[in-house]
Amino acid sequence: MARESFAIGGVRVRAGASRSVELPLTRLVTGGDVGIPVQVVHGREPGPVVWVNAAIHGDEVVGVEVIRRVLQQVSAKTLRGTLVAVPVVNVLGFMTGDRYLPDRRDLNRSFPGSARGSLASRIAHLFMTEVVAKCELGIDLHTAADRRANLPQVRADLDDPETRRLALAFGAPVAMHAALRDGSLRQAARGAGARVLLYEAGEALRFDDEPIETGVAGVLRVLSALDMLVEELDLPGPEDESDALPVTLVSRASGWVRARGSGVLQLDVHLGDLVEEGRRLGGISDTLGRRVRLVHADRAGIVVGLNRAPLVNIGDAVIHIAAIDEEQSGHIADERPLTARRWGGV
């Protein structure tokens, strides 16, 4: 018996087919129509229904390229289940390179939305009804905010066994237990019964090879872990497995080191550096080069985020450090000092 077709946006995608669909969104002041582009890969064989989305923030473009490359490697003829790919959710922000919508609302604080609310609320409602409601798992792709950079990392509810399994299957350098934020897609989707992995990597308005390649490999690994892919994955790994960190470091707590003075920031660490509490991470100088303040680690852990702005004010977030699970931290410390190891190429 043939598998049923997949309904979305007023159309039906037959089993064993891949189809582009546009979800009508709004009309521009010029009279042109705007919609959310969706690619549905509806496999011949039954299996999980998974969505992957990017650009909820319009300037976060890494995920757009991740989805493009993933779609090149997934075929409806061999896929078990269904993949719903939404490369650009915030279409209006994406067109202008803006994180927010024209009304300055943050789409990722507007879920689950309303059919009669603000523009952000209507987009959120459309996404929830046409995509999330039809899926059991979502992979939400993000980058750091403007003038920041993130080490590839997965944020998820690690207390849920299945979510944890998939977060570790993704294979990012770090998996972080993250609380739900009011109005976020992850919170609304969880309330609707779907699990969500949130991938953070790279910088806004920039394509970086490492975050893109890690994202592509991660999405494919998750699909494989769900038994959706027939073919075995041939994905790149560390060049020297004997000198590699664990596939994924687990963190349940993190925090930003903040500037204790204003001036020009000089950083002495990189994304992926393992640091000890009290280690010097950089300094802040005035424009004549006189040192104003030093920046020190307030905890041991791995550097998962950096402020790329050369100028900082007192109180600005400078370096994001994720504390490592105690068991993993001890294992790494036994092998080599934390300060001597880092994820290469990031």
Image (cartoon, rainbow, N blue to C red):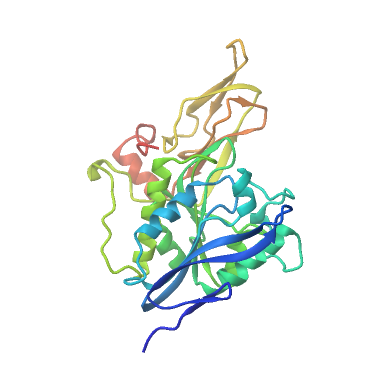
Residue at 75%, 60% in the rendered image: 118
On the rendered structure, is 25 left or right of 20? Answer: right
Residue 295 position within the rendered picture, expressed as x and y whole percent measured from the top left? 55, 26
**Image-quadrant location for residue 189:** bottom right
**Quadrant where the C terminus is found in the figure:** top left
Residue at 71%, 61% in the rendered image: 121
Residue 190 lies, with reference to residue 5, above or below; the image says above
**Image-quadrant location for residue 78:** bottom left
Residue 263 lies, with reference to residue 207, above or below; the image says above
Residue 274 position within the rendered picture, expressed as x and y whole percent measured from the top left? 41, 37
For the residue pair 274 and 96, the one nearer the viewer reads as 96
For the residue pair 163 and 125, the one nearer the viewer reads as 125
Residue 101 lies, with reference to residue 263, above or below; the image says below
For the residue pair 69 and 201, the one nearer the viewer reads as 69
On the rendered structure, is 329 left or right of 62? Answer: left
Residue 301 position within the rendered picture, expressed as x and y whole percent measured from the top left? 46, 40
**Image-quadrant location for residue 46:** bottom left
Q: Is residue 80 visible?
A: yes
Residue 28 position within the rendered picture, expressed as x and y whole percent measured from the top left? 70, 55
Residue at 57%, 67% in the rendered image: 190
On the rendered structure, is 298 left or right of 81? Answer: right
